Image (tube, grey):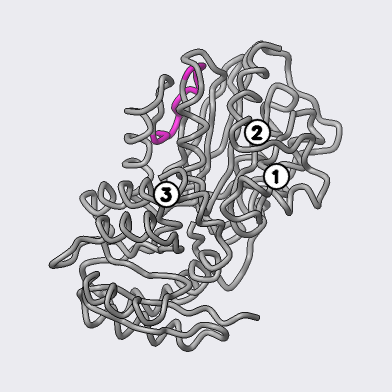
């Protein structure tokens, strides 16, 4: 395994110390430098360039967004944003993701040292994912997963779909999308290309609590369709996309000929909440052949099992191709399990959705 060289840029001495110690304790990771602001980072990078940068966004002398844009324009490098878990922090982080950051690590204002130590697996996983990311795709367009010791399946939320189980006839169609690392930029590219009239869309993007609302609001301002963070009991309507709130699972259910979403608590599934597998399983159960499932860029295997259930239930299934993925993990696993009917480039996914509408 090639050693991953990391630079930590944060104006908090506590964050620099704790993050550096956690990363150094992980096999195959070395912290080259831990500095207090981007100007110091630029000086150090003249001598040795890191493989991954862990970057704060609010710092003196030069803010993290300006530094990120400079890096992505001069020498694209995987950057993980380390942001406070606040509404203001969420807005700033959306700008960082749009500028090419790979993923987000959150930090609270209080109890920082204890929180960081509890998040060691999440941070290490984010660094390993960033190290293999196709960052040039992010630069050209400019979840982290939560880790757990036990890896649950969607069984902890709802039972699997019985073989051969059909759904009642309806004219309503739904598109379910699952994505993770690199997904914020990929979703922006897909959703902004969609016409005003589309099937109802439900989305799981691995993202921390508080950040999904800001992400949905940003997309809503860019798209012809309505994009919103999902609310419990909200109806799935044509011409809109509902994004699962960070820290909650989202399930599709059907009442008569109409679809609704349930937003619920529950254990991590595939080390995620929201989980793509949970959404896809509910879509397989309640929409069946009236659905399309799309799995996009991301690390790990969340969504692969659920997409297979959707395909067995008669749904159309699509995966993003390797070349256009930032991390070809989730789609690769879905293809490997036989869950994918069709593999397409990112730029063609909106056309798949549009053609599904017109069938």
- Extreme right residue here? 164
Tag 2 secondary structure: helix
* Labels 1 & 2 near each other (Cβ < 8 A): yes
Residue at x 40%, y 59% (from the top left corner): 104
Classify residue 282 as left or right of residue 146. right
Highlighted range, magenta: 229-239
10 Å crowding of disc 1: few (<14), some (14-19), many (20+): many
- Disc 3 designates what residue? 246
Marks 3 and 1 sit apart, C-alpha to C-alpha, by 19 Å
- Where residue 132 appears, as percent x and y from the top left, is 58, 65
Marks 1 and 2 sit apart, C-alpha to C-alpha, by 9 Å
- Disc 2 designates what residue? 283
Classify residue 305 as left or right of residue 163. left
Q: Is residue 91 magenta?
A: no
Query: Residue 221, located in which quarter of the rendered image?
Result: top left
Residue at x 20%, y 74% (from the top left corner): 11
Query: Residue 7, located in which quarter of the rendered image?
Result: bottom left
- Disc 1 designates what residue? 306
Q: Of residues 177 and 24, which is closer to you in this image?
A: 24
Q: Is residue 238 magenta?
A: yes
First of labels 2, 3 by sequence position: 3
Report the label total.
Answer: 3
Query: Residue 141, located in which quarter of the rendered image?
Result: top left
First of labels 1, 2 by sequence position: 2
- Where residue 15 appears, as percent x and y from the top left, is 28, 78
């Amino acid at each position: 395994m090639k050693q991953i060289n990391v630079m930590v840029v944060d104006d908090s001495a506590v964050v620099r110390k704790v993050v550096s110690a956690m990363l150094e304790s992980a096999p195959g990771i070395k912290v080259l430098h831990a500095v207090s602001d981007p100007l110091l980072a630029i000086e150090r990078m003249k001598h040795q360039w890191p493989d991954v940068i862990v970057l704060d966004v609010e710092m003196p002398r030069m803010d993290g967004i300006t530094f990120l844009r400079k890096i992505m324009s001069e020498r694209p490098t995987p950057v993980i944003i380390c942001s406070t878990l606040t509404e203001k922090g969420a807005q700033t982080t959306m700008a960082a993701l749009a500028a090419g950051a790979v993923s987000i690590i959150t930090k609270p204002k209080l109890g920082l040292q204890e929180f960081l130590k509890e998040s060691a697996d999440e941070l290490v996983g984010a660094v390993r994912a960033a190290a293999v990311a196709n960052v040039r795709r992010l630069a050209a367009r400019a979840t982290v997963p939560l880790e757990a010791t036990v890896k649950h399946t969607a069984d902890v939320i709802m039972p699997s779909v019985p073989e051969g189980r059909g759904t009642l006839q309806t004219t309503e169609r739904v598109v379910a999308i699952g994505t993770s690392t690199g997904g914020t930029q990929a979703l922006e590219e897909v959703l902004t290309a969609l016409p005003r009239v589309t099937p109802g869309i439900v989305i799981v993007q691995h993202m921390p609590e508080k950040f999904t609302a800001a992400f949905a609001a940003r997309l809503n301002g860019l798209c012809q369709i309505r994009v919103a963070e999902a609310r419990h009991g909200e109806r799935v309507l044509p011409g809109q996309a509902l994004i699962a709130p960070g820290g909650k699972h989202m399930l599709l259910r059907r009442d008569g000929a109409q679809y609704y979403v349930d937003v619920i608590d529950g254990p991590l599934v595939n080390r995620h909440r929201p989980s793509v597998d949970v959404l896809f399983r509910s879509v397989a159960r309640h929409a069946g052949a009236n659905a399309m499932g799309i799995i996009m860029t991301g690390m790990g295997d969340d969504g692969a099992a659920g997409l297979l259930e959707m395909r067995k239930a008669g749904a159309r299934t699509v995966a993003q191709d390797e070349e256009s993925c930032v991390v070809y993990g989730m789609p690769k696993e879905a293809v490997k399990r036989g869950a994918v009917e069709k593999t397409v480039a990112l730029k063609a996914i909106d056309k798949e959705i549009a053609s599904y509408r017109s069938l």
